[in-house]
Amino acid sequence: MSGDGDSGEETAGPSTNVFGEAPVPLVQLNLTALMDILSNLLFFLLAAFGATIVMVINGTVPVQSAEDSDVADMKRAVTVNVSVQKDGFRVAALGTAFSQEELDEMARQIPLHGSTHDFTKLTRELRGIKQRYPKSDTVILTPDAGVKYEVLVRTMDAAREYEAKQGKTIQTVGLFPTVVVSTVVR
């Protein structure tokens, strides 16, 4: 090796890179706006997740006896399933604290009244279930394919409340305030 700096290799000049090519211009990205958006998005996602967790937790107040607690009341409640079919309604009850025989007692088939669904008879059957299990508040509607939207809406109305006559006044009485549609309505 000689001390004159000649090593036999080509050295890159000030206007070329290591491979002898022209340098790529330096690009500087301003990511401030993107980071602001991502940090806000992260905050809202965490807040939404926290609210979801709080909504799912079933909170009951401890009581001295099981007869007075919310948990004991919910064991005496049923969830009603109403299948809206082209040939009428099928009413069934669901509940974890009941035997299959007790649930089968509440099952009813309500045929068409002429050529229309019998909403009055449906309300009567739901009133009977509500009177037996007053803590019940949920109806799940399962419409068959091809059931008209109007029939589904009238079924929801029949399950939510009914009109009771007291003397000369008519009073609206609630049945099952929570009505859930279990399939996509077309």
Image (tube, helix red, strand yellow):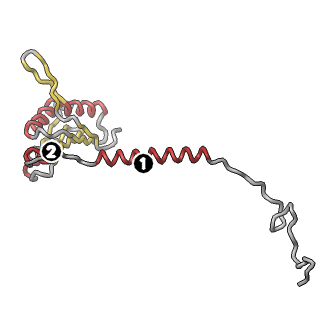
Distance Cα–Cα, label 1 vs label 2: 30 Å
Say which quarter of the image contains residue 87: top left
Q: Residue at x 57, y 47 (%)?
A: 35
- Give the residue number, with chain letter if any, for mark 2: 70
Q: How many numbered marks does the figure carry?
A: 2
| Position in image of residue 47 (x %, y %) | 40, 45
Residue 122 higher or lower than 4, as above or below = above
Is residue 28 found left or right of 43 in the rendered image?
A: right
Q: Which residue is drawn at 15% across and 29% down?
A: 120
| Position in image of residue 144 (x %, y %) | 27, 42
Is residue 107 found left or right of 157 in the rendered image?
A: left
Q: Could you say which is closer to the camera, residue 108 or residue 61?
A: 61
Instruction: Name the amino acid, label 1.
Output: Leu
Q: In which quarter of the image is the C terminus?
A: top left
Q: Could you say which is closer to the camera, residue 58 or residue 129?
A: 58
Mark yes or no: residue 1 visible. Answer: yes
| Position in image of residue 94 (x %, y %) | 16, 48
Is residue 106 found left or right of 32 in the rendered image?
A: left
Say which quarter of the image contains residue 21: bottom right
- Give the residue number, with chain letter if any, for mark 1: 46
Instruction: Name the amino acid, label 2.
Output: Asp
Mark yes or no: residue 75 visible. Answer: no
Q: Quadrant of the N terminus?
A: bottom right
Say which quarter of the image contains residue 79: top left
Q: Could you say which is closer to the camera, residue 157 or residue 167?
A: 167
SS at badge 2: helix
SS at badge 1: helix
